[in-house]
Amino acid sequence: MRSKSGEQRGSMAEVDFIITVDAKIIPVEVKAGTTGRLKSLYFFMNEKKSLCGIRLSQQPMSRVNNVISLPLYMSGEINRIVKQQI
């Protein structure tokens, strides 16, 4: 996604997936390890006014700043969890 709000030319934000839950756009980042920055996820959430974002990783379930972190094995539960959170 290219920024329309004054970002430098060539500036890009990438999220791994976009899903919809009850007609709401939810960005999803998948992190292979236990660490990883979420700069693109936050950028996308801000640009598109998303109510929340999802991070799938090896970390336990948590929620920080409208980002719901789920362990990889819970990916099939994203719709149910997002509906409970928003």
Image (cartoon, rainbow, N blue to C red):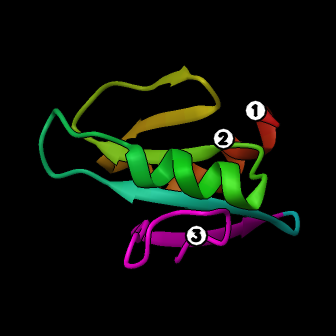
Q: Residue at x 69, y 58 (%)?
A: 47
Measure the C-alpha gap from mark 3 to mark 1: 28 Å
Q: Is residue 78 left or right of residue 17?
A: right
Badge 2 local density, few (<14 within 10 Å), some, or many (20+)? some
| Residue matched to label 3 | 3
Task: Identify the secondary structure beneath mark 1.
Answer: helix
- Amino acid on which disc 1 is placed: Gln
Q: Which residues are magenta?
A: 1-21
Is the Cβ of the residue at disc 2 closer than 8 Å to that at disc 1?
yes
**x and y percent of residue 40 in the render?**
43, 55
Q: Residues within 10 Å of mark 3 (few under 14, many from 20)?
A: some
Residue most extreme to the left: 33
Closer to the camera in the image, 1 or 4: 4
The prevailing secondary structure element of the residues shown in magenta is: loop
Q: Position of residue 7 (x, y in %)?
A: 52, 63
- Residue beneath label 1, please? 85
Magenta region includes residue 4: yes
Q: Is residue 82 left or right of residue 55?
A: right
- Position of the C terminus, as image quadrant, is top right
Provide the residue designation for mark 2: 81
Q: Amino acid at mark 3?
A: Ser
Q: Is residue 72 magenta?
A: no
On the image, the x and y values in percent for residue 11 come to 40, 70
Can you say whether 78 is above or below 5 in the image? above
